[in-house]
Amino acid sequence: MFPGFEGKLPGEDFMHSFYPIAIALFFGLIYGIRSYMRGAQSQTQERADGKTAVITGGNTGIGREVARLLAERGARVILGCRDVEKAMVVVEELKTSTGNKNIQVLPLDLASMRSVREFVVLFKQNEARLDILVNNAGVMCHPQAKTEDGMEIHFQTNYLGHFLLTSLLLDLLKAAPDGARIINVTASAYRLGQLDLNDLQYETREYKPGAAYAQSKLSVLLMTLYLAKHLEGSKVTVNAVNPGVVRTGIHRHMPFRQNILISLTFAPFVWFLMKTPKDGAQTILQCAIAKEEDGVSGKYYAECKVDKFEEDVGDGVKAEELWQKSRQLCGLSS
């Protein structure tokens, strides 16, 4: 006790009141930033009863949450997955959590044209229409590898496999009486993409995983733009969606995931700065069923609304050239 100060120390009342306020402000700031990082949430209340939806890569990450959200709205959901055994576990969990028993899985490996064609055959054996197609599955920063078809793995898994799948399902999409919607998942990395139609498989260029990923996501956007024009006059719309930076297994090849110590160090930042898969699924849900998106096609969506994309992407020339090249690579008649 200081001489002449009996009882409380100088400023003690102020400190007692300051600490709780400071702590409250700190946690309020953390909550505010975390809420902001979650991104926009779809406000649509639309149901999807009677609609059939196909979701590629629907057993993990964003695809799994899209499947859950659509199943909760009453849709019949078919997951296209490489590992059917693992996917069946997810199917049973989704059936239990949503109360929707119309969920199933069909084998689909987008890195194999044979698998894509087999998926379509199986699907058409039991379905006469398709209302929602979510081209979601993908890989990111994968080490250099070729698929069984001799394609660069990002190019075929993220883009060409979905190109073939969509092309083969167009007749069923056009058969949807109330109109069908195609949602292609891209990423902001498309802006870094360098499309070389003479070397799409990185046979002469230096291979960089990030560049290959960016090229594939640019290709997805170009496909969206060209297909939208191709489908004008039909009741089928197609849009590209950037879900944002989401915590999913797609980052397993990223450098920070390759070292356990680094991975643990980055874990709090990953949790804080990345969206959850459910948050990442919101813009896809908006494009899939929201009434206000009726008739909207050929757009790039982010945070549940139409966003701008780079002007040179929309010139149409690259999109048409890629489209024709893709048909050749897939063995589709002109």
Image (spheres, rainbow, N blue to C red):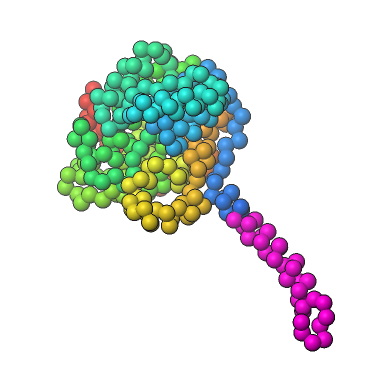
Query: Which residue, as the protein is rendered here, is positioned at the far left?
Result: 204
| Whole-percent x, y for residue 332 in the image | 24, 24
Regarding residue 194, the answer to whether it shows in the image is no
**Does 46 appear in magenta?**
no
| Whole-percent x, y for residue 22 in the image | 67, 64
Q: From what the image shows, is residue 170 above or below residue 310?
A: above
Quadrant of the image occupied by residue 63: top left
Q: Quadrant of the N terminus?
A: bottom right
Residue drawn at the location 53% of the way across and 17% of the way down? 50
Lateral position of residue 153 relative to residue 44, left or right: left
Query: Which residue, as the protein is rendered here, is positioned at the far bottom?
Result: 3
SS majority, magenta = helix
Out of 193 and 94, give the one closest to the viewer: 94
Q: From what the image shows, is residue 319 above or below residue 80?
A: below
Q: Quadrant of the C terminus?
A: top left
Q: From what the image shows, is residue 21 above or below residue 123?
A: below
**Does 17 appear in magenta?**
yes
Out of 96 and 194, give the one closest to the viewer: 96
Out of 152 and 334, give the one closest to the viewer: 152
Quadrant of the image occupied by residue 195: top left
Regarding residue 331, the answer to whether it shows in the image is yes
Q: Please provide the residue range marked out in magenta.
A: 1-30
Lateral position of residue 305 relative to residue 201, left or right: right
| Whole-percent x, y for residue 78 in the image | 43, 22
Residue drawn at the location 49% of the way across and 18% of the way down? 102
Residue drawn at the location 47% of the way across and 21% of the way down? 103
